Image (spheres, rainbow, N blue to C red):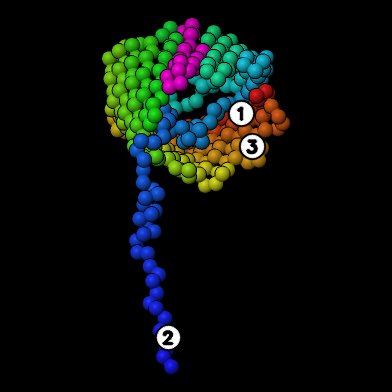
Amino acid sequence: MATLVPPPSTTTVPPANSNSAAAAESEKIDYMKLPCPIPYEEIHREALMSLKPELFEGMRFDFTKGLNQKFSLSHSVLMGPTELPTQSADVVKIPTAHYEFGANFLDPQMMLVGRVMTDGRVNARVKCDLSENLSLKANGQLTGEPHMSHGMANFDYKGKDYRTQFQFGNGALLGASYIQSVTPHFSLGGEVFWAGQHRKSGIGYAARYNTDKMVAAGQVASTGMVALSYVQKISEKVSLASDFMYNYLSRDVTASFGYDYFLRQCRLRGKIDSNGCVSAFLEERLNMGLNFILSAEVDHKKKDYKFGFGLTVGE
């Protein structure tokens, strides 16, 4: 009896490098669909939010009352010592108290914020969307002290994958910046400015790389400033941040490391820097529209200690 021999298998084995080729195809960058970067002036935004909270000393109370969906009034009281500038290393403080009255108008296309303080200062901020891509931001301060009043306006144009800004202010201050997305996660930018009152000009460059887990940014300017920052997201609630500031003209160096921790009803931020300064800032939600604030800072080099607590009422 003849033995039946099965036909040879016709199964085709894919080449070993087909998977890697498919992965490379899926990761191919579409340079016509790059995201719009954040403004040039905000490239260190995440590090600043974690490392530089609004520390204060003494007692603080903030109350905000909404009159309607767009208009609200605010009242702020701050009682605590104020540092006086001295030529010695000793810290001199005098007790002070301030009251601040504010009015706020918030609209999807416009924001108006005004503040009046008991020492005579008047602050104002404006943000207006002139079109879908063009916005105007302006701020100013009026004070009774000579040469201390100032104002500045900023035009921000948001392109498809770039941003450009032009700003001008008192003292013949002119500036322009541009930042461009190079890849979906990497952007490069530059700036120029001219301070006519002081007859000074400068140029700067910046780079930023961000993913879902980290943000790294660097900036250098002809004024001598070198700024580096890095933020690592450990989890949904915990982030670690660090920054490095160096002036290659004056040889001043400062480095700091901090954390940002979101708990169920509070946010805790703290840092330590190379000058021996340790600080912490706690914001706890006690109830809807009621927050408790704790602020602490210890400067071991100057032997200066600051502690503050406060309440924030209203949203």
Left or right, 27 with reference to 98:
left
In the image, residue 232 sits, relative to residue 118, either above or below, namely below
Report the magenta residues as a range: 124-145
Q: Residues within 10 Å of mark 3 (few under 14, many from 20)?
A: some
| Contact (Cβ within 8 Å) of mark 2 with mark 1 | no
Q: State the residue position of label 2.
A: 4
Q: Which of the two discs, 3 and 2, labels the residue nearer the N terminus?
A: 2
Q: Secondary structure at mark 3?
A: strand
Q: Residue visible at 58% across and 43% down?
A: 237
- In the picture as drawn, the residue positioned furthest to the bottom comes out as 1
The number of numbered badges drawn on the structure is 3
Visible residue check, residue 77: no
Q: Position of residue 145 (x, y in %)?
A: 46, 8
Image disc number at residue 266:
3
Q: Which of the two discs, 1 and 3, labels the residue nearer the N terminus?
A: 3
Determine which quarter of the picture holds residue 224: top left
Distance between the alpha carbons at the discs numbered 3 and 2: 78 Å
Between 137 and 57, the one lying in front of the other is 137
Q: Which quadrant of the rendered structure holds the C terminus?
A: top right
Magenta region includes residue 101: no
Determine which quarter of the picture holds residue 133: top left
Amino acid type for the residue under numbered disc 2:
Leu
Distance between the alpha carbons at the discs numbered 1 and 3: 17 Å
Q: State the residue position of label 1.
A: 308
